[in-house]
Image (cartoon, grey):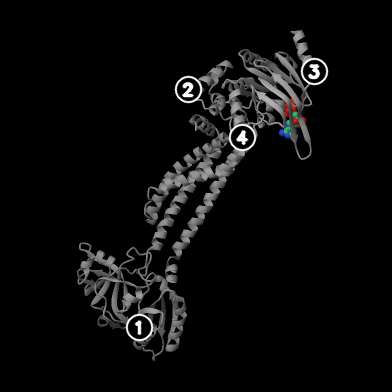
Amino acid sequence: MLTMHNVKKIFRTDLVETHALRDFNLQVDEGDFVAVTGPSGSGKTTFLNIAGLLETFEGGTYELDGKNVSNLSDKQRSQLRNEKIGFIFQSFNLIPDLDLFDNVDVPLRYRGFNSAERKKRIENSLELVGLANRMKHLPSQLSGGQQQRVAIARALAGSPRFLLADEPTGNLDTKMALSVMELLKEINDTGTTIVMVTHDQDLAKQAKRNIYVRDGQVSELSEVVSLEHAANA
Amino acid sequence: MNINKWEIGPIFRALMRNKVGAVLIAIQIAVTMTIIVNSIFIIIERSKLMQRESGIDDANSFYITNTGFGDEFDSKATTIADLELIRNTPGVIDAVQINAIPNSGSGWSMSFQTEPGENKEDQGAAIYMVDEHATKALDIEVIAGEDFTPSDVRWRENGTRDWPDTVLITKVLAESLFPDTPWQEAVGKTMYISQTEPMIIKGIVDKIQAPWVGWSDLEHSVLTPEITQFSSTRYFIRTQAGERDRLMPEIEEALASANKQRIIRGLRSVEETRERSYRGDAAMIKILSTTMVILTIVTALGIVGLASFSVNRRKKQIGTRRALGASQSAIVRYFMLENFLISSVGVIIGAVLTIGLNMVLVNVFSLPSLDWYFVPAGMLVLWLVGQIAVFGPAKKAANIPPALATRTV
Ligand SMILES: Nc1ncnc2c1ncn2[C@@H]1O[C@H](COP(=O)(O)OP(=O)(O)OP(=O)(O)O)[C@@H](O)[C@H]1O
Ligand SMILES: [Mg+2]
């Protein structure tokens, strides 16, 4: 599904060069649910951005769904993001001036679906996250947990193969975080591959697989964690 | 092009939830359109007036005033000598003594009627007192009937009350006096000056405008065959092409030295005279044009400002849209469409205001009413101004990196 080989990412400013990813190697299989943990600044978001084609990288190769995506144009990358990838953000990133219906509609418009198709998909995905009855509400009228559910509905509406989440529960209390996690697991059960960055070890443990990022690399420790996870299970 | 990708509905709904800036810009667009369209209309109307031809050879003509003083001054002899001198100067086509200059702002006018007596319908017309050299000197043409001959011409003294028996009139005056017959048939007919004094129309000339450019009957003119014997007279001189500027000082000099019993003054070209008469209109055009340009720039800057502000305010949203699959062109399209919607409201209000202002101008300043196509043309221009103004900020928005979605909180 996703294969990164020796991927490098360097951020250059006038003063410093930051090696955000150094020889980053990872393979994620179809249908997996991977939780990514690691210290702050270790490169988790950078990895997710590259995986989601939001950022380019300097070296190595990246294959998404069997296709080398290292040298795509901005337009091609936008299109791939739209078709194959769903994003969930820590701060939800709903568009404040649009109601829930229009928010979920955003990626479907870029896809070029006709209005009947969009309506069906919006209703289905809001139904899935339990907010179908609040379609005309604005994001500001919802709780954080509900907002994140809308964001998930928006990420899912285009039926992506691949869901990327950067600390999706980071702004939620434990109870809401758990319910979002339950939702993600349900989604994963239907076959959508999920990669989720989190600081919450307990949530990470609920994923099928754990990896640990340190200093821009997938650390050996990841094996230990997932072994522990397997043993505890 | 896939119309499903056009976010007209969401853009409109988002605008409705965030109206203030958009409404202000729409109003600005409406006001700008109102002023621009009406200004352009006025400018075009004024230019049309300014472009009306005087009927005489503006470019190659000038005039000069001769004012005698002292008891020794013999007006009649002076005029004969002066005209002879001028007409024989190489480069001069012809010259004529005349009492007033077309388009100059001052002259004589009289009323003319086709039946004698009081309370008859009459037409005002400018009077030009000239001799048989007039048609050549003024560059006008007798298009029906006959030109003056030397025997038609008489001397007019100070205090003379009556008028010559024959006259030439302009075609437009002939049409006004005899609306029911073809203008050619005015030749030989009698018209009355001072209500009862008859004049026979000897011929019709093509065109010579009256002195007053703001007058609605600008082409009503009558040529009377007489040379004035006043203490102050004026010579109108037509030169060959390109000779005017050389001859103006030369003739002034020659006249001044030929006779010391008078003052030669008021040397001026017909071109300059015309320019002076239309100076107010020219100034009005300049002011309106400047206002239009400034207003358009201010409106365009307002649009740029609002768009830049909203791009900055929506950076994260734009990053998010990019992350969700918006291409750069989709972001540009978003802002262009948003501007188009705002402009549309603006130009629709603008169309109403434009027509409203024109109606006020028609009533208060008796301006003609706007031709219909000015309104859609104005709408189109302001739509275009908006699209051009918003393009820069839209481009900037499209360059916001998609990673902004995950990098900002
Ligand atoms: N746009 C940027 N310009 C310069 N340096 C950057 C940029 N984005 C990230 N970095 C640097 O790259 C490194 C990796 O950052 P990244 O955001 O991937 O870390 P992270 O693991 O997601 O951290 P956190 O857990 O705090 O979110 C950090 O040192 C960070 O400062
Ligand atoms: Mg991060």
Q: Which residue is denoted by mark 4 in the rendering?
A: B314
Up-down relation of residue A85 to residue B38 (above or below): above
Quadrant of residue B228 within the rendered picture:
bottom left
Chain letter for the residue marked with disc 2 in the picture: A
Q: In the rendering, which numbered label is found on residue A116?
A: 2
**Which amino acid does the dot numbered 2 rest on?**
Ala
Name the image quarter holding the C terminus of chain A: top right
Circles 2 and 1: CB distance less than 8 Å?
no
Chain letter for the residue marked with disc 4 in the picture: B
Q: Which residue is denoted by mark 1 in the rendering?
A: B230
B45 relative position to A80: left or right: left
**Which amino acid does the dot numbered 4 rest on?**
Arg
Quadrant of residue B137 within the rendered picture:
bottom left
Quadrant of residue A26 within the rendered picture:
top right
The span from disc 2 to disc 3 (Cα, nearest Å) is 49 Å
Name which of mark 4 and mark 1 comes first in the sequence.
1
Q: In the rendering, which numbered label is found on residue A221?
A: 3
Circles 4 and 3: CB distance less than 8 Å?
no
Give the number of the mark in front: 2 or 4: 2
**Which amino acid does the dot numbered 1 rest on?**
Phe
